[in-house]
Image (cartoon, rainbow, N blue to C red):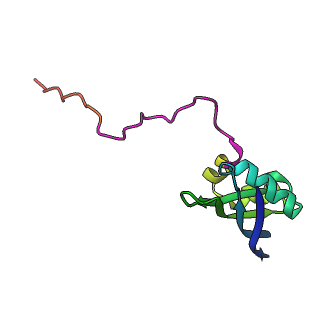
Amino acid sequence: MELEITDKTENKLINRIEVRFKVTHEKAKTPTRKEIKGALADNLGAKKECVIVDMMRSEYGSPVTKGYAKVYKTPEELKRFEKAHLIQRETGEGRKGGEKKEGGGGGGATAAKPAEKAT
């Protein structure tokens, strides 16, 4: 796996670095978010818990994955600015093995009891 940073922008207002990257993975599967996160942290000299991979995309049949990530100075700043579902996806916080969302999966209408008539 070969990581190349194609664009690097410092966002001083939010105190983070925004990175566009390209990963070449000849004769290997598409790298996971965790692998990319580690490679970015090593490349930029940051802690893994301060890196959030926002988006990554591979084209079918191509050994290239392109993406966008944000690198914060501290984990507290990451939690302050990032949305909860992105933090959960990156860290796994709040998830337990085999836990399912409440409410079933269909999202369809539920059967209601018919109203009783008053006599």
> How would you classify the magenta stretch by its main secondary structure?
loop
Q: Quadrant of residue 63?
A: bottom right
Q: Quadrant of residue 47?
A: bottom right
Magenta-drawn segment: 90-109
Relative height, residue 9 to residue 62 (above, below): below
Residue 102 or 36: which is nearer the viewer?
36
Q: Is residue 64 left or right of residue 40?
A: left
Please say whether residue 97 is one of the residues in the magenta stretch.
yes
Q: How many marks?
A: 0
Q: Residue at x 65, y 46 (%)?
A: 88
Please say whether residue 113 is one of the residues in the magenta stretch.
no
Residue 93 or 67: which is nearer the viewer?
67
Q: Residue at x 61, y 51 (%)?
A: 85
Q: Is residue 100 left or right of residue 92?
A: left
Task: Look at the image and tell me in which quarter the C terminus lies.
Answer: top left
Q: Position of residue 24 (x, y in %)?
A: 71, 61
Q: Residue at x 89, y 61 (%)?
A: 45
| Residue 14 in sight in this render | no
| Residue 48 in sight in this render | yes
Task: Look at the image and tell me in which quarter the N terminus lies.
Answer: bottom right
Q: Is residue 27 left or right of residue 57?
A: right
Looking at the image, the residue that sits furthest to the right is: 45
Looking at the image, the residue that sits furthest to the front is: 27
Q: Position of residue 25 (x, y in %)?
A: 70, 56
Looking at the image, the residue that sits furthest to the left is: 119
Q: Residue at x 77, y 67 (%)?
A: 4
Q: Position of residue 117 (x, y in %)?
A: 13, 27
